Image (cartoon, rainbow, N blue to C red):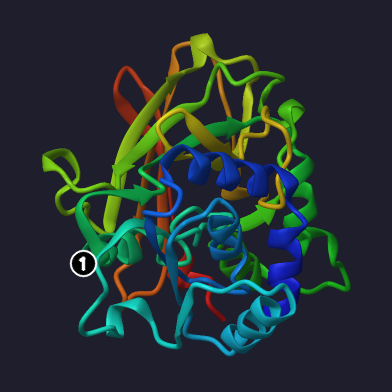
Amino acid sequence: MSEIELHRKLLGDGLRNQALLAALKKVIRPGKSTVTDIGAGTGFISFIARQLEAKQCTLIEYSDTLALARELARVNKISGLHFVQAHSAEVKKPPKTDIVISETLGNFALEEGLLETMVDARRFLAAGGVMIPCGLRQFVAPVFGSRLQDEIDVWPRVGFGLKLTPAREASLNNMYVKWVMPADLGGDDSHACEWDRIGFGPGPDSAQPSSLRTATLRWSVDDLSATVLHGFALWWTCELVPGIFISTSPFAPATHWEQVYLPLLEPLRLKLGDEVELTLSSDTRPRTGLRVAWKTRLLLDSRAVSTQTQDISRGRI
């Protein structure tokens, strides 16, 4: 996706824009607050911060989009801006500001390095300052409908007498950005589980959140609303400042972000007494980039009947 296409989608998302406006309104002290905008892109966040009378904004952006931000600032006669073309981690002597904001969320929340950016961004924060966002919760739910799996798993239908098993396995060791519908999840969010929670602000509860995130969850088939499991859906809820949220839940108003679908290698046919166990992990360390892995076990009396292990590193062909 081109840079301008990315920003077209971002700026076209009214829910996102209004949430950012509400968050900034809550924390900016007119004529006093200074702001660091990390991953500034077109400068939109800094522009609305200045409209709210932030004293000064520092825009940090490593891409050439920063030149567009300069031009937009000129056209709109927005002053009080300081432009820095660099990755924020490369800034050796960061300015200390009252508010540090970075909206670098992906469809998979951490795929754009949000966690690592926010941990490093504490260097830019003045004493008593505010980090935006302040927290993130990630959710997972079983997918019972076959719609998404049918879209992805085309390999058995190709025909021509070809055996495409290796290609199929590589394909199914990937995560897919998809619009997940409530019907895919059984019609409601009763089976959704929080698998990860991160606090970004300074403090003892969020001192150094790890780039390695993992959780193990279980669902009892007795509590599930369907008997065939095809995969899992992921989404997130981000708290910008206390009380102001952006969510990509299939049950929330749609944003420009979609959900993520993790397919199974084979559907699991479930019966009463079974349990489904999912171990889900992500690794967003800079040397890794992004690695998501998921292991699904079908349990009977706490004993594994079958296991499927998947990892997007196996699907990078």
Residue 280 in percent (x, y) is at 38, 46
Residue 288 in percent (x, y) is at 34, 75
- Which quadrant is home to the N terminus? bottom right
Residue 95 in percent (x, y) is at 27, 73
The residue lying at 37 percent from left, 54 percent from top is 32
- Which quadrant is home to the C terminus? bottom right
Q: Nearer the viewer, residue 313 or 13?
A: 13
Up-down relation of residue 181 to residue 34 (above or below) = above
Is residue 65 visible from the viewing direction of this image?
yes
Is 61 displayed left or right of 41 in the figure? left
Q: Nearer the viewer, residue 234 or 312?
A: 234
The residue lying at 60 percent from left, 21 percent from top is 189
Is 216 displayed left or right of 105 in the figure? left
- For mark 1, give the secondary structure: helix
The residue lying at 88 percent from left, 73 percent from top is 160
Up-down relation of residue 119 to residue 93 (above or below) = above
Q: Amino acid at mark 1?
A: Arg
Up-down relation of residue 252 to residue 133 (above or below) = above
User: Which residue position is annotated with label 1?
Assistant: 123
